[in-house]
Amino acid sequence: MQWVIELNGWAIAAAVAANIVIGFLWYGPLLGSAWMREMGLPYDFKPDATRMQRSLLLMVLSAVVLACAIQVLRPSTWAAGEDAANTFYALLGAGAVWIGFYVPVLLSGVAWENRSWKLFGINAGYHLAALLAAGMILAHWR
C-alpha cells in the first residue's frame, strides 16, 4: 500500500496567520498582563525580532505537523474506508497534537522550572485555541 501526504501551502499560511492573530489577542488584551506577571516580565516588555522570527518558524512547523496528523487520521489516506466530517479530523488532530506535544512540554515547565499552574493554564489554553483554529482551516481547506 502506498500513500502520500499532500500539503496545501495556502492552508498552512492561513493557519499560521490565524495563530498570529490568536497569539496577539491572547497574550495582548485578553491575558497579556497576567502572562507577563507570571513570567516576571516588566509591563513594557517587547520581544526582539529574532525571537519573533523563531516563533514564526515554529508556527509553520506546527501547522505542517498538524496538517500531516489530520491527513493521517483520515481512512481515505490509507484506502481503508470513507472519511467522516472534516470537523471531526480537525478536532481529533488538534487534540492529539496538543495532548501529545504541547501539554507534556508545558507540564515539564511546572515540574522542573517551578512555573505556576496559572502560567501553564494561560499557555496551554493559547496552544489549544491556536491548534483548534489551525485544525479547522487545515481540515476544511484541502
Image: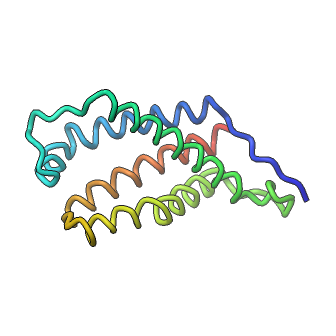
Please give left or right for residue 48 compared with residue 39 in the image.
right
- State the image quarter where residue 8 is shown: top right
Residue 17 sits above or below residue 37 on the image: above
Residue at position x 29%, y 64% from top? 109
What residue sits 42% from the left and 39% below the top? 19
Quarter location, residue 104: bottom left
Quadrant where the image shows the N terminus? bottom right
Q: Residue at x 14, y 50 (%)?
A: 34
Q: Is residue 32 left or right of residue 56?
A: left
Residue 65 position, x and y percent, is 59, 49
Residues 140 and 5: in front is 5
Res 63 quadrant in image: top right
Q: Position of residue 47 (x, y in %)?
A: 24, 33
Q: Report the front residue among 28 and 47.
A: 47
Which residue, as the protein is rendered here, is positioned at the far right?
1
Q: Is residue 81 left or right of residue 64?
A: right
From the top left corner, tell me how far across and down residue 93 is, in percent: 58, 57
Q: Residue at x 82, y 59 (%)?
A: 78
